[in-house]
Amino acid sequence: MDPLILTFGTALVTAMATDAWQQVRSGAVALWQKARPDQADVVEQELTDARTLVLAARDEGDTDTERALAGSWQIRLQQLLRDDPALAQEIQRVLDEVLKPALAPASPQGRTVTMTATAQDQGRVYQAAGDQHFTEH
């Protein structure tokens, strides 16, 4: 199977459980709209159904369901690519512009850290908003 399809299918299913779900669904539906417009509405509903399964599987710690869903979407995408090899560019674009950003960890920039500490007598306070290394003798 094409590595692009493997990556896309896995990213699609993983991104279903993110806060970016609406963008993920829209990106995937737009892909189908280009390839097979007559199937776009059905695919949109199937994506929504798959998301429900992914969320339930995560709640239950069921990784097999996520893998199976990724495999199912990979097969479907592979067929799209076989029917229209030029679609690879659009698949790559959706992967780069929609799926990968949905999976990117939140940027630590702009985070707010508030620390409060009180030390009395001979007490010490060590605080860090990241890594902290020290050596005492």
Image (cartoon, helix red, strand yellow):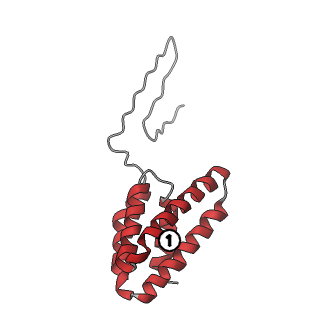
* Residue at the spot of label 1: 9
In this orientation, which residue lies closer to the viewer: 125 or 76?
76
On the image, the x and y values in percent for residue 16 come to 49, 58
Which one is nearer the viewer's eye here, 66 or 134? 66
**Disc 1, SS:** helix
Q: Is residue 83 above or below residue 112?
A: below
Is residue 99 among the parts visible in the rendering? yes
Kind of residue at disc 1: Gly
Where in the figure is residue 100, as x and y percent of width and height? 40, 63
Q: Residue at x 49, y 82 (%)?
A: 78
Query: Is residue 114 placed above or below 71 in the rendered structure?
Result: above
Q: Is residue 122 left or right of residue 41?
A: right
Task: Name the residue rendered at 63%, 50% in the picture.
Answer: 59
How many dots with numbers? Answer: 1
Instruction: Identify the residue at image location x=42%, y=26%.
Output: 115
Above or below residue 63? Residue 85 is: below
Q: Position of residue 81 (x, y in %)?
A: 43, 84
The residue that appears at 52% across and 66% down in the rendered structure is 46
Which quadrant would residue 113 be assigned to in this image? top left
Category of crowding for the residue at label 1, using alpha-carbon neighbours closer than 10 angstroms: few (below 14), some (14–19), many (at least 20): many
The image shows residue 75, relative to residue 22, as above or below, that is below
Question: Is 129 or 136 nearer to us in this picture?
Answer: 129
> On the rendered image, what quadrant is the C terminus found in?
top right
Q: Is residue 100 visible?
A: no
